[in-house]
Image (cartoon, rainbow, N blue to C red):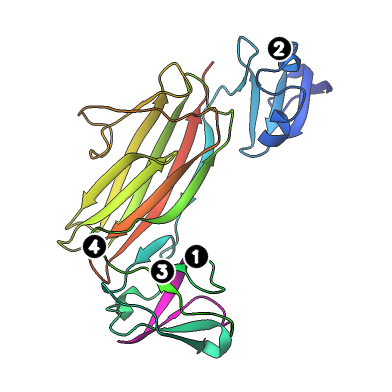
Amino acid sequence: MANFTNPLGRASSTYLDRMTWAELQASAYANGSVGLSGLGADASVFVTDWRVTMVPNSGKTFWTSSSAVILAAFGSPALGNDVVYTANGTTCTAVASASAGAATRLTIVGHGLTSANNGVSVYVASGTNWTAGLYAMTYVDADNIDVSAPWNAAYGNPTVRSVTGSGLQTVLRTVDIPAGLMQAHSSIELSSTWEMTSSANSRYLTILFGGTTVLQLTSSSQSGFFDRREVRNRGAKNAQITQKTDIAGYYGGTPRLTTIDTALAQQLTFVGDMRTVNEFIRIAGYTVSLVIGN
């Protein structure tokens, strides 16, 4: 701590230099600390996680920013961050090396996938020496696909997610909301763009905040979807209000009330779910910003 010209170009008697959010909250100037309450009115710190200058709020009880903090801004390539399911009841019965060991071939008799979805991911839920997650697939024939996992002779037969009657949610992307960042009057502003197979069948796109649904839409006969919404603390860190979960954008309907403890670290989770084989859903992009408030 010293006399410096801070990143805003103003002379400051207390510029704490550059820190990550975790470093700041582990320092003598963490939210709620005696150190923070004793800082001058012109104190500032540059938080490297989001490349933003933060200052104490008027009560010197937490760090805030005069502008929204962009927590995440993401735009997907043409492929990736998507999932397609194999036919109901299908299982992997054999694995083998493919593409000179650069990929792994899965034998799934009658998998139901086609080359139209080459590059879209299947979801491996479990299997000996497999890491659960999304693997881009390439169609080989009606009973085989290659996936983007370098060959490992120790692989067992993985469990690949297939269509089920009730549907299974697959996590496509997550955004971390660090502990201590949201305050009693903070709000998260979220926009998201989705792509999917155009058909009359239902696809389910969902956003969870702290494990609680804040968006869940059934989309059919569409190949894309855009949503904007806000999750706002209601004067307490464990009480929120947002739009009705099954209405897109800033529209009416009964608001959704939640009780997520934003004093703790939480996650935004983007989830896809299909009920029809060989149809995909993709999170094509999103922006997550946070207005901390005073």
Identify the mark at residue 121; answer none if there is no mark. Answer: 3
Q: Is residue 137 above or below residue 123?
A: below
Q: Residue furthest right?
A: 2
Which element is circle 4 on?
A: loop
Left or right of residue 11, residue 193 in this image: left
- Amino acid on which the number 4 mark rests in the picture: Arg
Check disc 2 and report the residue beneath it: 37
Q: Is residue 232 above or below residue 235?
A: below
Residue displayed at 68% across by 25% down:
8
Image spot of residue 248 (x, y percent): 25, 39
Report how far apart the C-alphas of labels 1 and 4 lie in the structure: 21 Å
46 or 5, nearer to the observer: 46
- Amino acid on which the number 1 mark rests in the picture: Ala
Q: Is residue 108 above or below residue 227?
A: below
Quadrant of the snapshot with the C terminus: top right
Residue 9 shows in the view: no
Task: Please report the bounds of the magenta region as a residue range.
Answer: 133-152
Report how far apart the C-alphas of labels 3 and 1 lie in the structure: 12 Å
Q: Is residue 281 above or below residue 30?
A: below
216 or 12, nearer to the observer: 216
User: Are the residues at dot 3 and dot 1 in contact (C-beta closer than 8 Å)?
Assistant: no
- Amino acid on which the number 3 mark rests in the picture: Ser
Q: Quadrant of residue 224?
A: bottom left
- Amino acid on which the number 2 mark rests in the picture: Ser
Report how far apart the C-alphas of labels 4 and 2 lie in the structure: 54 Å
Among the two numbered marks 2 and 1 on one chain, the one whose residue lies closer to the N terminus: 2
Among the two numbered marks 4 and 2 on one chain, the one whose residue lies closer to the N terminus: 2
Identify the mark at residue 275; answer none if there is no mark. Answer: 4
User: Are the residues at dot 4 and dot 3 in contact (C-beta closer than 8 Å)?
Assistant: no
